[in-house]
Amino acid sequence: MSTPSDTPSRVDPAFLQELGDLIARSLELDVAGSDIDPDAPLYGEGLGLDSIDILEVALVISKKYGVQLRADDADNHRIFSSLRQLAGHVARMRAT
């Protein structure tokens, strides 16, 4: 049985682009935030981020949005599985 945290919520396309831009700028990627496929994996294939990149993304998100992303969170694999999942998580956390 799935729970609301298991399924990607409908995320505002403008927020997806904003978060994509933030990731691209903070990691100095050679891709525009708007060109990041929201459903592609962030790790390895897809965007190609590694664990250090993910830590940097978590720090930038924490500073900008006030959302704490902990390294020991059991849901990190899901949260960072794609831009859409990450944006949905950040949006949910900001709403609480």
Image: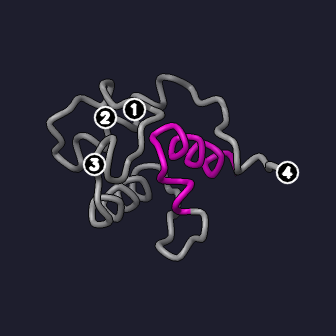
First in sequence: mark 2 vs mark 4: 4
Task: Look at the numbered disc 4 and give the secondary structure of its residue.
Answer: loop
**Which residue is disc 1 drawn over?**
18
Q: Amino acid at mark 3?
A: Gly
**Which residue is disc 4 drawn over?**
1
Task: Look at the numbered disc 2 and give the secondary structure of its residue.
Answer: helix
> x%, y% of residue 19?
40, 38
10 Å crowding of disc 3: few (<14), some (14-19), many (20+): few
First in sequence: mark 1 vs mark 3: 1
> x%, y% of residue 86?
51, 46
**Mark 1–mark 3 contact, CB under 8 Å?**
no
CA gap between label 1 and label 3 equals 19 Å
10 Å crowding of disc 1: few (<14), some (14-19), many (20+): some
Disc nearest the viewer among 3 and 2: 3
Give me the disc on residue 61: none
> x%, y% of residue 90?
55, 48
Q: Amino acid at mark 1?
A: Glu
Task: Look at the numbered disc 3 and give the secondary structure of its residue.
Answer: loop
Residue that protrudes farthest toward the bottom in the picture: 72
10 relative to 7, above or below: above
**Which residue is disc 2 drawn over?**
21
- On the rendered structure, is 42 left or right of 10? left
**Mark 3–mark 2 contact, CB under 8 Å?**
no
**Which residue is disc 3 drawn over?**
48
Disc nearest the viewer among 1 and 4: 4
First in sequence: mark 3 vs mark 2: 2
CA gap between label 3 and label 2 equals 16 Å
CA gap between label 2 and label 4 equals 34 Å
Q: Amino acid at mark 4?
A: Met
First in sequence: mark 1 vs mark 4: 4
Q: In terms of secondary structure, what is the magenta stretch mainly?
A: helix
